[in-house]
Amino acid sequence: MRGAVITASETQYEFDSHAVTNRVSLGRLTIKYKMKNSVREELSEYITERVQEMKNYKELSSDIGDIHNEIFNQDYYIIGYYNADKWLQEHNISSWEAMSICTDWENENFGECSGKYDNAETTVNMLAYIWGMEILYDLEEELLN
C-alpha cells in the first residue's frame, strides 16, 4: 500500500512497501524519520520479551517512560562494533543514515546534539532507544495488560 496515511493520536504514519515514515509531534518539535519494517518487527519482539521478563521477575511499572528506561538505558541492545555493523547491514541502513537519524532526533528534541555517533555500537543503541520509545507507546495497552 504505497502512500497511505493513517493518523493515530499525535503520530502520523505513511506506509510504503519498505518502511514506515513516522512524524511524531512533541509540542512544537517535529521529527521525521524512517523505520524499516524489519526493525519494527525485531524491536517489537525484543520489547515484548523484556516486558515479559520484567513481569516475571519484578514488579512492572505502569509508566512507559520507566519501562523504556529499564529496557534501553539499563543495558545495551547491541554489544560490539562488529555486531552493530552487521545489524545495520541486515536492516539495510547505512552508517550515515543511522548517524543522521540520531543527530536529527537529538537536535529536534534538545536543540543540540550532544551524542557522539562515531561508531556503529553507539549509533545502533541510540536508534534502538529512539525507535524503542515509539514502539513502546504503540504497544502500551497490549504490554501493560
Image (tube, rainbow, N blue to C red):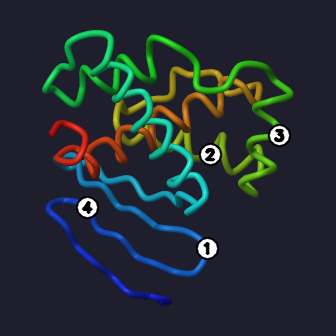
Residue contact at pointers 3 and 4, CB within 8 angstroms:
no
Q: CA distance from mark 2 to mark 4?
A: 21 Å
Check residue 18 in the rendering and tell me which mark sits there, or answer none.
1
Q: CA distance from mark 3 to mark 1?
A: 19 Å
- The residue under label 3 is which amino acid type? Lys
- The residue under label 1 is which amino acid type? His
Residue 80 falls in which quadrant of the image? top right
Label 2 crowd (10 A; few <14 / some 14-19 / many >=20): some
- The residue under label 4 is which amino acid type? Thr
Q: Which badge, 2 or 4, comes first in the chain's sequence?
A: 4
Residue 106 visible, this orientation: no
Residue at which label 4 appears: 11
Q: Is residue 139 above or below residue 6?
A: above
Q: Nearer the viewer, mark 3 or mark 4?
A: 3
Residue contact at pointers 2 and 1, CB within 8 angstroms:
no
Assign the C terminus to one quadrant of the image.
top left
Q: Which badge, 3 or 4, comes first in the chain's sequence?
A: 4
Q: Which badge, 2 or 3, comes first in the chain's sequence?
A: 3
128 or 97, which is in the foreground? Answer: 128
Q: CA distance from mark 1 to mark 4?
A: 19 Å
Where disc 2 sits, the SS reads helix
Q: Nearer the viewer, mark 2 or mark 4?
A: 4
Q: Which badge, 3 or 1, comes first in the chain's sequence?
A: 1
